[in-house]
Image (cartoon, rainbow, N blue to C red):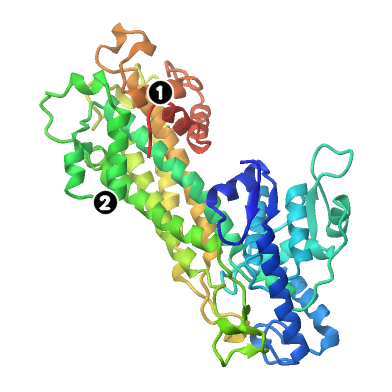
Amino acid sequence: MSEVVLDGESLTPAEVVAVARENVPVEIADEARETVRESRERVEAVLESGEAVYGVNTGFGELVDERIPPEDLESLQVNLVRSHAAGVGRELTREEVRGMMLARVNTLVKGYSGIRERVVDHLVRLLNEGVHPVVPAQGSLGASGDLAPLAHMSLVLIGEGEADCRRPGEDDPQRVDGETALQTVGLDPLSLQAKEGLALINGTQLTVAIAALALHDAETLRKSADVTGALTTEVTLGSTVPSHEAIQAVRPHAGQTASARNVRRLTADSEIVESHRNCDRVQDAYSLRCLPQVHGAVRDALAHLREAVETELNSATDNPLLFAREDAPDRASGTAEAAVLSGGNFHGEPLALRLDYAQSALTELAAMSERRVDRMVNPNVQEPHLPPFLTERSGLHSGYMIAQYSAAALLNECRSTGRPSIDTTPVSGNQEDHVSMSAQSALSFRSVLENVQTVVGIELLCAAQAAEFLPDADELDDTDIEHGVGTGVAYETLREVVPKLDADRETHVDVDRARTLVASGLLAERVEGVVDLE
């Protein structure tokens, strides 16, 4: 895509990826600009009325009952951003920061936040010019939204904090203070007006940005897992009957049906599968036989997460929100033209619960993949045509023995990772007495995803090696082994970067290359050149 136009209603995870990773420029739709202006007019009307309204002329959190005089309203907003910039830990990556900025702009242009058009334009300019605030990853409770990370992002708008940007005449990004960062793109620091500081920092945009990016990668991973699982089924002389459409039809879960269909397409025309169709084996182990059921359940979990991410990207998540009077209850504070409603749209629970669910699902994907790795390398359970640990001279050589160790270690990490959404710690003098921990759920999901990408990469590595020992394979040239339409491409793709293991070598190099094929999406992309994957 050449441009992403934000209207507060239609931002997709794919567009988040395009802007965050590929630097696709951003524009604001004209109708969205009009809603921003109308929303700001409502704030001005409330200020003129003199009524006490949270976030406009009161303190925050436990200090909600503290009335702020008109002459201090700008200081109130600046102080809010400064004081809430209390993040700690590692810095967010460039793509995480860009995703968060993009998501924040989109929620602001929905027209319920009361922010000036100029503030939105500053954020868009930073995105398009490649100015990226330095934002610590930890400190958010996911209610009232991702306060600390968004505050660090907002510091740069007022000429404070730090940012990474390219200054004129320099090739590499440099870290500079916020004011210098603004100067490099021809902007002056903002003087935040009433409601604007709160509008910038109150929302779930860190959570949803990380979720959108990780969801994109997880959906690629689910395809790669079907590919590696199908290849493993093939090279271990497993049966593809469990993926037959008749079995899925009588238990028609959408994910199960899709994964089974993938296996059938991937192994289509496989002479390897045909060669043992009439063998004496009655059933395969669960890690092969139940692939559609487990991989399919993972698909369904990711689909559930996608629904929440797509909704959240296009939601107003700050507090309070400004509405036209006719759209609000009579008792709402405000004026004859505008109503201010306090609520809890900043609470990250709709994302947190689904992120934790999806994290558990990915862990199960790793569990199945690791068991298939073991069936290929373990001399106590592997098929007779496979040598111990997939090496011809086992004993002298250890082959891929320790690659399975690494898969087991990563699986343990996935299983040991907590489920943040089930915890809460009251804050702000107990005014905010239940929080979602959604940012932790997003960061945890990202971490588990990375581990599972490696486990699936290890399965790809071992499956390709197992293919070298197929019955009668020694009579054929390696490139002529008759795999299925899709499994053959998977084998060849791996062999382009990892040669057959004839003798022990530094295994981590092989693992890293296989993982890169999975994590980058190249494996799925190459296979999709010949097979329509779901």
Locate residue 477: give its quadrant: top left
Q: Residue at (67%, 68%) from the top-left corner?
A: 35
Q: Nearer the viewer, residue 509 or 40?
A: 40
Q: Residues within 10 Å of mark 2 (few under 14, many from 20)?
A: some
At x 52%, y 58%, the residue is 442
**Is 245 positioned to the left or the right of 141 in the image?**
left
Whether residue 408 can be seen here = yes
The residue tagged 1 is 489
> Three-letter amino acid code at disc 2?
His
Q: Position of residue 321 (x, y in %)?
A: 62, 77
Could you say whether the residue bearing mark 2 is in a helix, strand or loop?
loop
Asked if marks 1 and 2 touch (Cβ < 8 Å), the reply is: no
Specify whether 53 is left or right of 213.
right
Between the C-alphas of marks 1 and 2, the distance is 28 Å
Circle nearer the viewer, 1 or 2: 2
Q: Residue at x 66, y 89 (%)?
A: 336
User: Which residue sits at x=54%, y=88%?
Assistant: 329
Q: What number is the disc on residue 210?
A: none
Specify which label sits upstream in the sequence, 1 or 2.
2
Q: Depth check: 370 or 130 in front?
A: 130
SS category of the residue bearing label 1? helix
- The answer to whether residue 84 is seen in the rendering is no
Where is the C terminus found, in terms of image quarters?
A: top left
Q: Residues within 10 Å of mark 1 (few under 14, many from 20)?
A: many
Look at the picture and state if 379 lies above or below 346: above
Which residue is disc 2 drawn over?
Answer: 253
Front residue of 418 and 49: 49
6 in relation to 454, above or below = below
Q: Nearer the viewer, residue 430 or 164?
A: 164
Q: Position of residue 137 (x, y in %)?
A: 64, 59
Dividing the image into 4 quarters, which one contains the N terminus? top right
